[in-house]
Amino acid sequence: MRVTLAELACLLAGELEGDGQTLICGIAPLDQAQTGDITFLTESKHAVRLAASRATAVLVAPHIPVDRPAIRVADPYLGFIQLLEHFFPAATSHLGY
């Protein structure tokens, strides 16, 4: 699946920061993300890990400074779950959500 960061921001009702045409191909944790992936960050104390990440974009809370395109949402944990459901609908459909 390939979607733009702007499409994901719309899906999450989040605030887009950076180039909305940035292509996202997957989601991954900070330490495993590769180019084309979006990751998520919930606390500013992990910003060093973000700086070392290869992620193309990040899902983040409004108050956390970032060094790449981002989608800012009030609850990054919930946003990450929504992204999982979007990228892997068959895997999450059996959960009854």
Image (cartoon, helix red, strand yellow):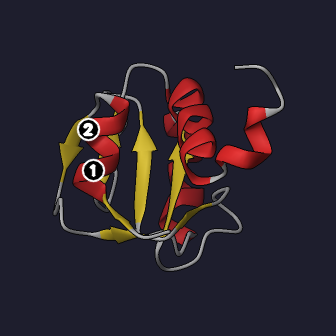
Vertical order, 77 against 5 (above or below): above
Would residue 42 be visible to someone looking at this image?
A: no
The answer to which of 57 and 81 lies nearer the viewer is: 81
Q: Residues within 10 Å of mark 1 (few under 14, many from 20)?
A: some
Residue 50 relative to residue 68: left or right:
right
Q: Nearer the viewer, residue 65 or 28?
A: 28
Q: Quick one: 21 or 72, which is closer to the camera?
A: 21
Report helix, strand or loop for mark 1: helix
Q: Residue at x 63, y 58 (%)?
A: 30
Q: Is residue 78 above or below residue 45?
A: above
Residue beneath label 2, please? 10
Looking at the rendering, in which quadrant would you find the C terminus? top right
Name the residue type under label 1: Glu
Q: Residue furthest right?
A: 94
Nearer-the-camera pick, 10 or 50 = 10
- Residue 81: x %, y % from top left: 62, 33
Disc 2 residue type?
Cys
Q: Could you tell me residue 42's position as x and y percent?
A: 55, 33
Residue in the image at 49% along x and 80% along y? 35
Extreme residue in the bottom direction = 35
* Tags 1 and 2 touching, CB below 8 Å: yes
Q: Residue at x 66, y 51 (%)?
A: 88
Q: Quadrant of residue 39?
A: bottom right
Q: Position of residue 13 (x, y in %)?
A: 29, 28
What residue sits right under mark 1 in the picture?
A: 7
Residue 83 visible at all: yes
Residue at mark 1 to residue at mark 2: CA–CA distance: 5 Å
Check disc 2 and report its element: helix, strand or loop: helix
